[in-house]
Amino acid sequence: MSAFAYRDGELHAEGVALSAIAARFGTPCYVYSRAELEGAWRAFDAAFEGLPHLVCYAMKANSNLAILDLYARLGSGFDIVSGGELARVIAAGGDPGKVVFSGVGKTDAEMAQALEAGILCFNVESEGELDRLADVAARLGRRAPVSFRVNPDVDPKTHPYIATGLKESKFGVAFDDAPRLYRKAARSPHVAVHGLDIHIGSQITDLAPYRESASKVLDLVDRLRADGIALAHIDLGGGLGIRYRDEAPVPLPEYAAMLRGLFAGRPERLLFEPGRRLVGGAGVLLTRVLYLKPGAAKSFAIVDAAMNDLMRPALYDAWHPVDPVRPRAGGERLWEIVGPVCESGDFLARDRRLALAPGDLLAVGAAGAYAMAMSSNYNTRTRACEVLVDDSRMQLVRRRERCEELFALENRLP
Ligand SMILES: *Cc1c(COP(=O)(O)O)cnc(C)c1O
């Protein structure tokens, strides 16, 4: 059961009415459920009980320190994509020794920062990166732990912007090139070969591409072992989808059973990099209706959240559920739920049958992942605040920005 449910005619987050959160902290406001966040992590971890594994939360999905803190306390590792994310892990009390560093464009400074912090592994995405990393490690007198992110050329059947494992994608090294790169890395005194990594895409709702890529990878791992290159871990990436509308997410037990069939009894530890699956369903964006503009062709409900707060609808044409916090009886019609930003692409939802009045609160659901994390200050809009609900307690985990802060780094002409 979701932590977001109606009680006494009103939508709650766990034991707290969303209207109470809006009254105390204002809108727009992201609201997260601690029980959902922790429950999702525990369920993921428990699915692989008995297989040596480490869950490395892909924190770009939602990098609020409070969420990282919760996961660090559960023993989570983290998948990072920048030096900034590493700084967040450390600030949140996470263990750098459980951090894997992904991304196609790591800078020298980020490599040095991660080497000094003692991360678990670099997921290397090109030969140029391998050479650069070896140089940086040599300069620091360290040996860099590496995996290659191998591109298995598998179609995850998801939105093209979030498919990452196809041949034409910018991510990873070509499958056929991997053996040569592993041999090169194994010869280098400045890197230590630890593992192999794949990540084929995001919001995947089909088990087949996972099976296909995992089997391909196993072949490669065995060939490397025969070549004298034994890997300590295999990182299977993230990408498991969630339900936004009517998708049927892959059940964790099915995913785990498929992997058990392939990996049980093998010497390599499995790493996972789930992002959306852990946090996506654990958040809502709370927004208030400012104006209603009923029209002959389209009717617009203008709300106080916009594409700068939640970019997914504008970016991917993503569908998020929109639920009234206190549903009204009767008077429904179709609404376009739009924000105040000066762009026609500024919509949160289209064609929603709702009974609305100005001042009503709406909850945009499944907004825990790639939501606040992708927000911006476009139109000089302060970013939403974030509140974590734990049973009947609400805690502000990021206060609303102040307008002066948005231009505090800028200078007028002398
Ligand atoms: C974004 C990303 C993830 C997480 O993807 P989800 O779809 O949120 O699970 C994992 N690994 C890498 C390398 C990523 O870039």
Image (tube, rainbow, N blue to C red):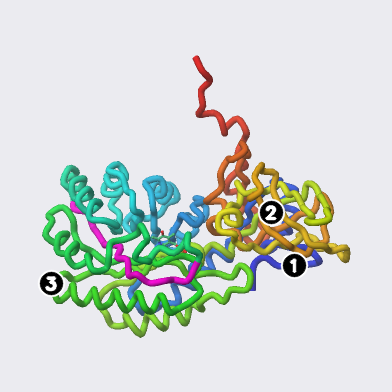
| Residue 317 figure quarter | bottom right
Q: Amino acid at mark 3?
A: Gly
Query: Do residues under tags 3 and 2 come within 8 Å of each other at their CB atoms?
Result: no
Residue found at x 19% / y 76%: 223
Q: Amino acid at mark 2?
A: Leu
Horizontal side of 235 relative to 372 (left or right) equals left
Residue 228's tag is: 3
Residue 36 coordinates in the image, percent (x, y)? 58, 66
Residue 177 coordinates in the image, percent (x, y)? 22, 65
Nearest the camera: 142 or 24?
142
SS for tag 3? loop
What's the magenta region?
143-158
Residue 384's tag is: none
Residue 266 coordinates in the image, percent (x, y)? 27, 79
SS for tag 2? strand
Q: Is residue 54 visible?
A: no
Residue depth check, mark 1 versus mark 2: number of the one nearer the observer: 2
